[in-house]
Each structure stands twice: as structure tokens, then as C-alpha cells.
Amino acid sequence: MSHSSRAALFALGGLALAFSALRPPPAAAAFIATERLLRACSASDARSTADCTGYIVGVADAAQLRRGEVCVPAGVSVRGLREAVLGELRRHPGESDAAAAVMAALRTLYPCPR
């Protein structure tokens, strides 16, 4: 299996875990808080790392569907994407909604050429 295939499978598995582990109970349905995402990203266990990575990659994949808004270069690794976004989130805290915070970080880090 190629490196890109393994990375894609890892991202998909992480995304599935992210939705199951980061999702609040149904009675308290709400968006994932940035604080909660950062806690998962700071944990040292494999499940939390996969949750964090899957969430970030999922938002990045969705962002790239909106043509012209976010353009992650082909050579960026899943780990590189995760670390870049986390660095941006830590440098610029404030957004409480994790998806909005990750999207803002992606726009800053990977703007599309105009």
C-alpha cells in the first residue's frame, strides 16, 4: 500500500473516530468547542491523536471543496497539516467553535493563489 493510500485511510479512520469521540451527547447537541479539540490534540494516547487529526483533516477536506477558499498543497503530509493548524490555533485563540477555528487557520495557512 502506498504512503498516500495509508495516509488517506488513516485520515478516514481518524475522521470516523473524531465524530464518535468528540461528539457531545445527543441531549446537548452542539458544535465541538475549540477547547475540547485542543485537549484531544494535546493528549498523548493514540485515540485522541487520531480524533484530533481526523477532525482537522475532515475540516480541511470540506474546506477544499469550496473552491478558491483553501488550497492545501499536494505535498503537505497529514501530520504537517495537523501541526500547522494546531500552531495557528494556539497562536490565535478566541474562536469557540472548533470547525470555524480550524477553517480560519486553514485560510491563513493555505490561501489559494489569486
Image: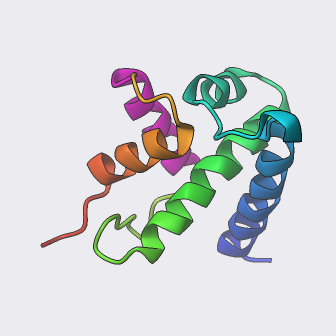
What count of labels does the image hold?
A: 0
**In terms of image quadrants, where is residue 89?**
top left
Q: Quadrant of the N terminus?
A: bottom right
Question: In this orientation, which residue lies closer to the viewer: 52 or 2?
Answer: 52
Residue at left 77%, top 59%?
10
Question: In this orientation, which residue lies closer to the viewer: 35 or 80?
Answer: 35
Residue 85 painted magenta:
yes
**In terms of image quadrants, where is residue 98?**
top right
Establish if 105 lies above or below 41.
below
Residue at left 72%, top 76%?
2
Residue occupying the far left of the picture: 114
Q: Is residue 24 left or right of residue 52?
A: right
Question: In this orientation, which residue lies closer to the viewer: 55 or 95?
Answer: 95
Residue at left 34%, top 25%?
92
Establish if 45 lies above or below 60.
above
Is residue 25 visible in the rendered image? The answer is no
Residue 72 percent location from the top left of the image? 39, 64
Q: Quadrant of the C terminus?
A: bottom left
Magenta-drawn segment? 79-93
Residue 36 percent location from the top left of the image? 67, 26
Is residue 64 visible in the rendered image? The answer is yes
Residue 25 painted magenta:
no
